[in-house]
Image (cartoon, rainbow, N blue to C red):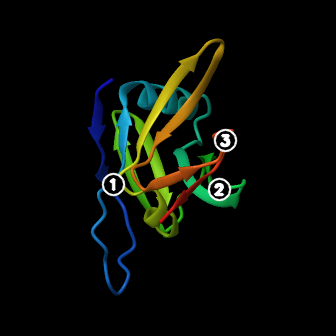
Amino acid sequence: MLAENLHTAHSVTPAVTPVWKGLTLTHRAAEQISYLSLREPNIKGVQLDVKTSGCAGLSYTMNLVTEISTDVLMFSRNRACVFVPLKAMPYIDGTEVDYVSIGLNQMFKFNNPLAHQACGCGESFAVE
């Protein structure tokens, strides 16, 4: 499946601005995010973040966004907008977000080049 590099549309400039690779979003992921965003007029997109969880240490979170924070990077493809808090970028920079069907289940899948360890159930990951 082809992925497209996303472009930063909004960021807060800290004292030292790191250079991020950003995110890639497959066509299927962009379609699903657009579908979720268009269901309600006040939804701006989704926020991709990480939290401490699971046996490997970190897990991904995705939430619908109605208000845009000032400490995020915004990536977009077509009508799909993904907001990533600056604090999450060291853990997910360079990640490809996909939307896959496995049997009867459909889910977002994260292909993260920084993830060097994952738990057995696939719910959490660790970075070096």
Give, as a three-letter code, the residue at label 2: Ala
Pointer 2: what residue?
A: 56
Position above or below: 83 against 26: below
The earlier-in-sequence mark between 3 and 2 is 2
**Residue 128 rendering spot, x and y as whole percentages:** 47, 66
Mark 1, residue position: 22
Residue 126's mark?
A: none
Q: Which x, y percent locates residue 26?
A: 37, 31
In-image side of 16 versus 114 (left or right): left
Q: CA distance from mark 3 to mark 2?
A: 9 Å
**Residue 104 locus on image (x, y percent):** 66, 12
First in residue order: circle 2 vs circle 1? 1
Which residue is rendered at x = 38% and y = 81% of the image?
A: 14
Query: Up-down: is 69 above or below 16?
Result: above
For discs 2 and 1, the disc positioned in front in the rendered view: 2
Please report contact status of discs 3 and 1: CB closer than 8 Å, yes or no. no
Disc 2 crowd, CA 10 A, few/some/many (<14, 14-19, 20+): some
